[in-house]
Amino acid sequence: MAVLDTRVLRRQKIRNVAQGALLLAAMVGVLGLAGWLLFGKQALLWVLAGGAIIALLRPRVPARWVLSMYGARPLPRHAAPHLHRIVAVLAQRAGLRYSPGLYYVASPTANAFAVGEDDDAALAVTDGLLRRLTTRQLAGVLAHEVSHIRNGDTAIMSLSDSIGRFVQVMSYVGLASIILTLPLTLSAGDPTPLLLSGVFVVLPNLVTLLQLALARSREYEADLEGVSLTGDPEGLAQGLIVLERLEGRIWERTMVPHGRSSDTLLLRTHPPTAERVRRLAELTPVRQRHLGVDRPVTLAGYPQVATAPRLRIPGIRW
């Protein structure tokens, strides 16, 4: 199978669109349920209309806000000229109008992520990632993240986050109102408020599971399109294996303490690495498009970070 087999990409795109639409619809449904329980049937249409407006407006969170949460700062071109060249070539091959900014996170954790869209898009890489991957492996990982930007995955996840925050706020309001009226309802012997409180506790967790499923649904396409940018499926596969062996993804460590990835698929932001590597092994490399070689990344003027991760907003250790 060739790397640039458009049929494979087209099937994956159709699958992602269908899964994404269903998962976003489920999130809006949870939002409607929360509004119905809190304000009654009359408010259901208003809540659903609000969810539709959110989907249409697609509120954008400035990339700098997210980057500041992790202490990310721009990585100067003179410090890593080869990395900047790789990002520029990937952006050009992906057909992006603007090349994403490259940011450095002073953390020993091995991780990379993409934020923003269009002229506000950015790629962040940690010190731990730069020290552990070769330029070939890093090119594969960066191509994967660039594909997320091209496919609009960062915008979709921002939308799902907005819906999740609405559900969370409404759940808090519901719990607060139940607590305030609890003495009266208990004296009347009505168990309904206790049942409703349990529902309001479950709803945000349900949205979180839907968000994780939405994130997983985008990964295979990002792998395929990332490889189409580099022509090097083995480079990305090797990078994924290194990341899996080290500590897993940051969001998985958030859900599962002690720095270990969850074995439960529902709590993973990414599909199993073994399955991703298996799919990559079926692709044929295109040597003319390779961007990196099997050698360490050169990072001038940045000493290796060896301190323990710090607790940052909103409670994530880096």
Image (cartoon, rainbow, N blue to C red):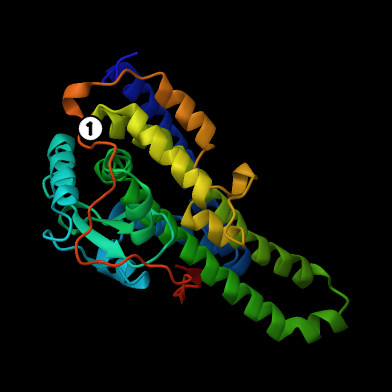
| Foreground of the two, 289 or 23 | 289
Q: Residues within 10 Å of mark 1 (few under 14, many from 20)?
A: many
Horizontal side of residue 42 vs 157, given as left or right: right
For numbered disc 1, what is the local secondary structure? helix
In the depicted structure, whether residue 1 falls above or below residue 51: above
Name the residue at 23% across, 37% down: 292
Name the residue at 38% across, 50% down: 132
Quadrant where the C terminus lies? Answer: bottom left
Quadrant where the N terminus lies? Answer: top left
Residue 301 in the image, given as x and y percentages of width and height: 20, 67
Residue designated by label 1: 229
Name the residue at 21% across, 30% down: 290
Residue 221 in the image, given as x and y percentages of width and height: 37, 33
In the depicted structure, whether residue 277 falls above or below residue 142: above
Residue 82 in the image, given as x and y percentages of width and height: 16, 48
In the depicted structure, whether residue 147 falls above or below residue 316: above
Q: Is residue 26 something one can see in this rendering?
A: no
| Foreground of the two, 105 or 293 | 293
Quarter of the figure with residue 163: bottom left
| Foreground of the two, 187 or 269 | 269
Q: Is residue 172 something one can see in this rendering?
A: yes
Name the residue at 52% across, 64% down: 167
Horizontal side of residue 278 vs 159, given as left or right: right
Residue type, mark 1 in image: Leu
Quarter of the figure with residue 193: bottom right
Residue 210 in the image, given as x and y percentages of width and height: 54, 49
In the depicted structure, whether residue 157 falls above or below residue 7: below
